[in-house]
Image (cartoon, rainbow, N blue to C red):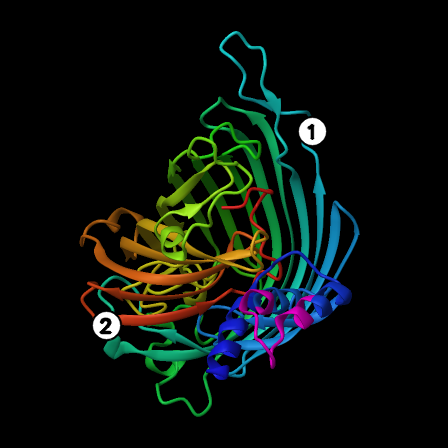
Amino acid sequence: MRRVRWFHLILLVAAAADAEDWKTTKQACQDARFFNGFQLHNAEECAVDFFTLDPFGPAIGSVTTGSEFGGGVHFVTQPTANNSFTEKGLYTLNQSFLFGGQYQFNFRPPHPIVTGRRPDGHGGQTDLTKGNLFITAVHFDLHSQDFYGLGPNSTLAGHAVYRQHETWVGIEGYSPLASVGNYLGIFGISGQLKYLHPATTGVSGASFPSVRDLYGEAGAPSSTVNHDFVAADVGFDVRTPTSRPRVWEHHEAQVTYTHYSEVGSNQFSFGRLEAFASVSFDLSKSLPKPLPGQSLLNQPERPWWRNALCMENSRKGCDIGTITSTSLVTTSYTSTGSSVPFYFQPTLGGADFEGVDTLRGLVDYRLRAPNRLLTQVDFDKAIANIGVKGHPIGQYGLYGFFDAGNVSLTPGQLTAQGLRTDGGIGVSIAVQNKIVFRVYYGFGAGEGNHLNAKAANTFALTPHSIGSWIP
């Protein structure tokens, strides 16, 4: 039983919660009474506080998909409310590692953005969405990554492995520009410039053949040679305002073009156009009003099973769950004689390189090609709070999902062979509105059923999204 308790707490600490000092953490851990009258909710708070110590503290999670679970250290300093510096190092169970640093600067938009105006042009409120700038340097070494061939007709029998290590430095920025109506929300622009030094090799002692030996250049471009790249991108998006006029809906849509230029040659230079859209609807209902004569300040406590069905919120109601629909299209373009390096090609199956769930009824990285199409519908709901009563720091959740997608070697063939589909159910742990651990069971994709567990992805150093909007 004690082992279960400790495992439960470890799952919470991959969070990117607000940093805590040692005094707060010490008090939370004392209140947990680990060895005498164990208090679960205080222990949950102790665990999260411990792994977000400021400025020095331990780190836990995975580097990226396929790197397995690991631990390390982090250093975070925030001189002002609008700028911070993060350093992080992580080493995992399969001998993968990452270390890097990132500077973040937040700023106000060039001019105030007013949302929610009335039809006569009056009223409204100033939106609080901030722009941001990230300067990042990272080195990582992924001991073993999976590859099954390119295109929609690859098979599990073509399983090969490769080791990937890379050093990159870059600058990334986003700025909100204007309001584009009460529904569409905030229009913004983003950009990025990176210098990348990637390399792939074989995996010593592996039970599967190496990508270089099994596929070579014909089946896996750039598997036998290594080159440096300069990547530049520009993107435009619309998103729900931070000062949302509707609490029950949020959305984001983004179009980005990235050009990868090989240094010293054009053999592996290519362009990539990506479009992403997501919309979520929160389902809720009102709770019964107090009986006549009953005090509003002395309401009977709701039993846990009622909260599991409909989680009580601060708006005198309860949340049934959230329905989210997401679509993603990635297309790649090359000149005559050029090709996209296999390790830069997007994937479907499990989670992709960025840790984003794709076709969850397939194994990680199962389908890979220069072009991909993915659409998903998820329903998730909170079933219990994490932390001390009255001051939750997160939630346990259940969710169900449906995925459909495929890959292709050319943009025009994305739907030529139909879409692979799957469905499934899962459980999750969220801290500070971010999913930090999830376990799901996917089925229906034609290659068996798959149970998968994923910790928060450490690859991004800090779990920022472009802009200050939190999905």
Residue sitting at the far bottom: 205
- Provide the secondary structure element on which disc 1 rests: loop
Q: Residues within 10 Å of mark 1 (few under 14, many from 20)?
A: few
- 403 lies left or right of 186: left
Whole-percent x and y of residue 284?
38, 39
- The residue at which mark 2 appears reads as 155
Residue occupying image coordinates x 49% and y 10%:
119
Task: Tell me the amino acid under the disc marked 1.
Answer: Pro
The x and y percentages for residue 268 are: 47, 61
Point out residue 452 in the picture as x, y percentages from the top left corner: 35, 70
> Which amino acid type corresponds to the residue marked 2 in the rendered image?
Thr
**Circle 1 residue:** 110
Residue beneath the point at 44% across and 35% down: 290
Viewer can see residue 198: yes
Answer yes or no: do the residues labelled 1 and 2 have beta carbons within 8 Å?
no
Q: Which residues are magenta?
A: 28-43
Q: CA distance from mark 1 to mark 2?
A: 51 Å
